Image: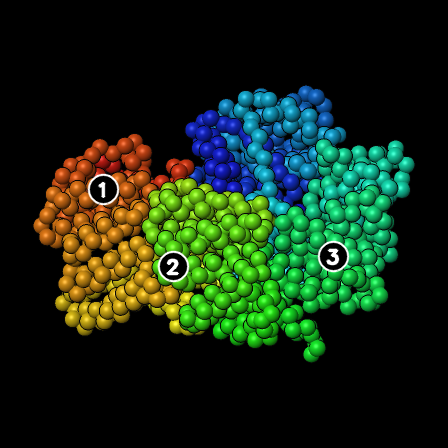
Amino acid sequence: MPQASSVTPVVGRDAELTRLSAVLERARAGEARAVLIAGDAGVGKTRVLDEVGGRAAEAGMTVVTGHCVDLGDVGLPYLPFTEILGVLAADERFASALAAHPVVERLLGAGSDSARDVDGRLRLFEGMAGLLADVADVAPLLLVLEDLHWADQSSRDLLRFLLGRGVLRHRLAVFASYRADDLHRRHPLRPLLAELIRLPAVERLELRPLGDSDVARLVRQLERRPLTEATVRRIVERAEGNAFYAEELLAATDTESGGVPSGLADVLLIRFEQLSDTAQQVLRTAAVAGRRVEHELLREAVGLPEEELESALREAVGRQLLVAGDDDTYSFRHALAREAVYADLLPGERARLHGAFARLLVGQGRAAESAAERAHHYRESHDLAEALTASLEAADHAQRVGAPAEEQRHLEAALDLWPAVGAEARPSGGGVDRVTLTLRASAAAAHAGELHRAVSLARSALAELGQDADSELAARVRYTLAGNLLSVDSLTAAFAYSSEALAMIPEDPPSRTWVWAAATHAMAARHVGGNETALRVARRALGVAEELRMTDAQADLLISLAVFDGGGRRGPEGRERLLRARELARSSGNAAVELRALFNLAMGYYESGALAECVPWLTEGLDRARRAGLLSSPYPLEMRYLRLVVLHVLGRWDECVRAAAADAELLPAAGAYTVGPALYVALARGDMTAADRASALLEGPFDWMATLVAGIVLTDAAALRRDPGDAVRWTRSTVAALTDEAGARPDVAVRLAALALSAVADAAAEARSAGDEATTRRWTDTAAELVELARTTATHAEHGTPQGPEGQAWLARAEAEWIRVVSGPDAEAWSQALTAFGFGDVYEQARCRLRYAEALVAAGRREEAAAEAREVRETADRLGATPLREQVDSLVRRGRLADTPDADERAVLTAREQEVLRLLALGRSNRQIGEELFITGKTASVHVSNILAKLGASSRGEAVAIAYREGLITPEPSASG
């Protein structure tokens, strides 16, 4: 495998790099150690060694690398050590050391002739140990040995001698890497590793495959052009944590159509081609079965005697191509290895084996469980009629077990096969036709969270309808399409199709189709501003649903009325309707409607500011979605986001971040629904890369939630940077993007306006203090626009009713910022904003408290201001909100709030703060400080903030100047001669 490029980013290896860096630090202090680094080919061993080698060189260590090379059974003895000696001999610093050990110089000349006899060999080993010790005395030394699995016997013996006979008593570290997947049972390196790992100064480090999120990050960093989420996800799935495979798959995205790139296939097939012919035959057969195959099924398919099969399997397992499972199964060690072997099959051989597996699965009598496998094998063996039947069976099975994504996949496979299978060979009865199958696939896609695909499939069903189509079926297609369009915010089109559906069938006689068409039309009418129409149609349809005893439709219509009518879902009547709807939906078994009821119950409590009462409904809803297999459908995604928002608002930030990471791992395609609140936390903690991650959410087709999350993060980030122009631009563009086709602005507009007003108020205050009247007027006009946006949104909200406590709190903040623009900080206005956020928003309450403290200082009420500042500081420290902590410390210094702890008196710096201060004086950034002290950049930032506060400094430079003046640090000695 070629050496990784030095520009390849290192991702997902923080823990390993920290551990290796600690070994280097101990080596520089004279406590030498060796680390044996194991990992599969391509997992990133070389890249990690390159990175840690670079760090060692920056720290003043000499780094020398020796490479072992695969030269077959007869290799060049001492090859890696010869390479190392060549590097040392070229360095003038080590000339005297080499002269003191002339025996080792023979390795640079005549190869192994100098070490054939036992005495000569011992002298060579001792000379090498002495040389390395002397070199390490001149400068700390890092010795890197790569690809130890290819090392010759002499090199292995020399390594054993060096690590076991005292060379590790000097300023030396040895890092040796090897491929774990190359070490079959009889590999000669195995006994050496077992021996070395028992030595007290030797440790083992295993580089495991990268996590999916790390592979995705690697792929995006390697590729400058934007990649679709589907492309990244496909690479991540196929690479299975292997960095080299991910790079190769990425490089082939423009040229390959799903297969293994040819260069990668060659690499993967090398080990396969070293097997016996029988073992190769077994692996080819296993590759057709899939990633995993049962022993009995493989035996029947390959047709070999048991003894020959077992011998071949033992060979494949020993070469680490197959892995034996506990349940009498065998799996390919890596899926791409299976793909490469499969691609190497001849077309006829491939079709024959697929047909054999399909017939064997039928014979096993596991019809439901094996339907998906049978469909696959029949399709690849070109028996399309049987493939169609099996695909429909597989879709039915997926529906029964609550797996909508799999149901969608099997239904779409059936739709692809449908025109290729003659009418006489298609399944008959049960109303199975192309239109109903397409409608069913659309419903499955919606349940799986593939909302745009659901729309596309419903449009396909509409296109398939003939002129003489049944009116009820035509209406079903249209209201299904309307419902899907509502889910992707295409509101005008949704209303048009729901109107057509309702017009196609009479209200009398009553029918199920009319009820569902009416229920969809009521929602569509509401979204385009037809509130009266929505209420009238929903009430009529509820009466018909009760008459027909359609309990799930009753539940759905009750939810609509609860949201549309009177006080909405926040009022007692709305909650009563929602509770009844939940019971009706549960009794009918309609999980999708039950989830809609639970989501609206949770939202009603959240909008009322009753956060504690909100949580149980979210827990119940997500548990119901999990049991129904609907976690990716729209309402569970909304509930997942709301649960994370509640954790954020309550100040349970670490819990929020952990839950968001778990959600993203479970539902990688959920996007903003899972990452949004974690981005809010990251930004509040000073991680400005949150803005870059938020911007990435806007790539691809319009997504309502992604736009909302990105708008919040990017507006707030601009305010934190004190960039009012950018904050205003993001507010305007986000509100415009989220305003619906009826002109209704989103509820979040009040929050965005308040955040932008914060930056505008800062700019106006600066302009006023500078006497710049024109700039002051310009920002005042902008502020007037923003406060009006906040007022109209909070008082009328999305559907004409005032917003709840959260919206009113953001309005109070916007009003306080507006007063700050026109007349300066007002304590009463900020007191009202502070009280308004008292429903439970810990962070926003602290931000308002800071502004309140500023207003108190301006009013000369220092004692009160100091008390408020203390509370802000405590909250900022508890949350880890570094920017907020820096802001309150700045206020304390500027306001001379002497009774605030640590404000005026110089506190003694801790030992860690002394270390940070020393590095600060050397001009190190927070990241560099973190790397040198083996702490995170965020922790370094907290230490820097503490130092500024204790020294009463307003900047890093001022802190260093004070420290020099007061003798807390002394100038570093000059490096020049």
Q: Can residue 267 be seen at all in this image of the molecule?
A: no
Question: Which residue position holds label 2?
Answer: 568
Whichever of callouts 3 and 2 sits on the residue coming sooner in the sequence is 3
Dot 1 surroundings within 10 Å: few (below 14), some, or many (20 or more)? Answer: some
Question: Which residue position holds label 3?
Answer: 392
- Give x and y (percent) for residue 689: 41, 53
Q: Residue furthest bottom?
A: 467
Q: Can residue 860 be seen at all in this image of the molecule?
A: yes
Question: Which residue position holds label 1?
Answer: 871
Q: Residue at x 16, y 71 (%)?
A: 773
User: Mark 1 or 3, which is nearer the eye?
Assistant: 3
Most foreground residue, 279 or 612: 612
Q: CA distance from mark 1 to mark 2?
A: 37 Å
Q: Residue furthest left?
A: 860
Most foreground residue, 874 or 594: 594
Under mark 1, the amino acid is Glu
Whichever of callouts 1 and 3 sits on the residue coming sooner in the sequence is 3
Residue 764 lies in what quarter of the image?
bottom left
Q: Residue at x 79, y 62 (%)?
A: 428
Q: Are marks 1 and 2 in contact (CB under 8 Å)?
A: no
Q: Secondary structure at mark 1?
A: helix
Left or right of 579 on screen, residue 889: left
- Give x and y (percent) for residue 721: 31, 57
Circle number at residue 915: none
Most foreground residue, 745 or 8: 745
Q: CA distance from mark 3 to mark 2?
A: 43 Å
